Amino acid sequence: MTEEEQNKNVLVDKVELAKLLDRVDRLESTADVGRLGRYDARFFKKGPNVFSLSVYNGKIITSWRTLKDVAYKDPRTGMIVEDQQYEILFSNNTKLKVQGYEQFSDMRYKERVRAEEISRTTDDMGITITVKIIDTGSKFYGEELAIGAQFLN
């Protein structure tokens, strides 16, 4: 073995290594996930945040707002009925009104593209995050968008 290889390799007894790996496995399986996450965030450098952006009809959804959200009891059935209406804003500044939460939810979760955080700014309106599309197979690849943090997940 060369000196360089000796500096890279560590000789450990198989039994001792198995015990150590078993102990690490037990500790990780019983650890408090929240505490581990806080520890990792504090002590380990992490890469850029990656978000999933919603795509509908070939356009990226950048924001939405609730126009109407009324719950009432249907006199015929006695069931609680919700009447909801949303306005969706797309990356090309077009808008679409949507009736009902089911359609709104389908729009937001059926097709997604991944985007990486480039920068983050804070102002009176809240936090705005500039993202860059990183899905290489997407027609939006490389496109940069500024989106409110409340619309990213």
Image (tube, grey):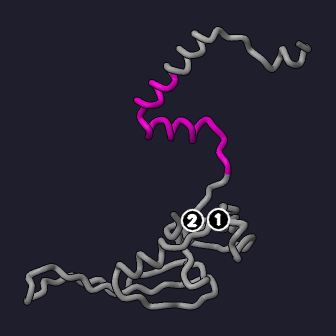
Q: Which residues are magenta?
A: 24-47
Report the residue at 59% width, 65% height from top. 122
Q: Which residue is mark 2?
A: 52
- Estimate the x, y position of residue 28 in percent, counting from the top left: 47, 30
Left or right of 78? Residue 51 is right
Residue that lies at the very extreme toward the front in this rendered image: 14
Q: Main secondary structure of the magenta part?
A: helix
Q: Secondary structure at mark 2?
A: strand
> Can you give x and y, in whole percent of width and height, for residue 142 in the image?
75, 70
The quadrant in which residue 127 appears is bottom right
Please report the residue visible at 41 percent of the width from the left and 34 percent of the height from the top.
32
- Specify whether 39 is left or right of 71: right
Q: Amino acid at mark 2?
A: Ser
In percent of width and height, residue 46 lies at: 65, 45
Q: Nearer the viewer, residue 90 or 67?
A: 90
Please say whether residue 41 is one of the residues in the magenta stretch: yes
| Residue shown at 56% from the left, 70% from the top | 112
Does the CB distance between marks 1 and 2 fall below 8 Å? Answer: yes
**Which quadrant would residue 52 be assigned to in this image?**
bottom right
**Crowdedness of circle 1 by 10 Å Cα count: few (<14), some, many (20+)?**
many
Helix, strand or loop at mark 1: strand
User: In the picture provided, is 107 more to the left or to the right than 71?
Assistant: right
- The answer to which of marks 1 and 2 sits earlier in the sequence is 2
Residue plotted at (9% across, 85% down): 77
| Residue type indicated by callout 1 | Ala
Q: CA distance from mark 1 to mark 2?
A: 6 Å
Disc marking residue 115: 1
